[in-house]
Amino acid sequence: GGGGILWRNGVAVEYTYFGWSELSLDIIKVAHGDCRGQTAFEFLTLFVVAATFSDVLSSTGALIRGDNLGSLNVANGLSSTTPAMNAIAREIAWRRIIYKWRYKISHLSAEWNDEADALSRLEAEPRRAFPKSALSGASFVQAPLQDEWLWRTRLDL
């Protein structure tokens, strides 16, 4: 699964986590547990978390931080050599135009990405506990469904 946190002035204010839908897995052509799709999973996480906090990207903009350089590079240029990454990039590009998403991309060392990594494992089997104190005061926000409404630029749905 995936997860992300909205921080304001160094304080976690909202967070989300989610599992992958069959539709998303079909679109990016990656199966659960297939390590060859790690960068696609990371980019899918970036997309779903961005969609979760779409209002922030449309109003004030945001700094998106992650630990996977491949997904961050594609998010910056919105182009890739793989169909999976391009499918996600199309969705982000569409939202940058339609919803006026504004963001900057920054790399965050994996050692500093503990909370988001822990959130992404909440949907794993076996389930792992999440230290509640890590996000004390932050509110859970449900991620959007990974359905046709999320995957709007798909022509062959």
Image: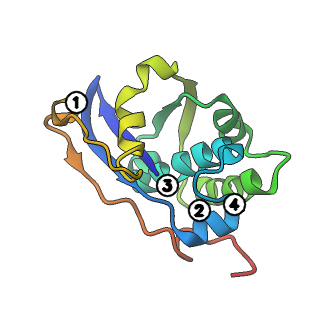
Residue 105, compared with residue 57, is above or below; it is above
Q: Which circle's residue, 2 or 3, is located before the other in the chain?
A: 3
Q: Which circle's residue, 1 or 4, is located before the other in the chain?
A: 4
Tell me the residue at 31%/60% (across/down): 142
Q: CA distance from mark 3 to mark 1?
A: 22 Å
Q: Quadrant of the C terminus?
A: bottom right
* Residue 76 falls in image quadrant: top right
Secondary-structure class at tag 4: helix
Q: CA distance from mark 2 to mark 4?
A: 23 Å
Q: Amino acid at mark 3?
A: Val
Secondary-structure class at tag 1: helix
Residue 9, compared with residue 92, is above or below; it is above
Q: Which circle's residue, 1 or 2, is located before the other in the chain?
A: 2
Crowd around label 2: few <14 · some 14–19 · many ≥20 (10 Å): few
Q: CA distance from mark 4 to mark 3?
A: 13 Å
Numbered badge on residue 28 = 4
Tell me the residue at 40%/52% (across/down): 125
| Contact check, label 2 and label 3, Cβ < 8 Å | no
Numbered badge on residue 48 = 3
Q: Amino acid at mark 4?
A: Ile
Residue 77, compared with residue 88, is above or below; it is above
The answer to whether residue 101 shows anywhere in this view is no
* Residue 139: x %, y % from top left: 20, 47
**Disc 2 designates what residue?**
98
- Which of pointers 1 and 2 indicates the residue nearer the eye? 1
31 lies left or right of 120? right
Q: CA distance from mark 2 to mark 3?
A: 17 Å
Q: Which circle's residue, 2 or 4, is located before the other in the chain?
A: 4
- Which of pointers 2 and 3 indicates the residue nearer the eye? 3
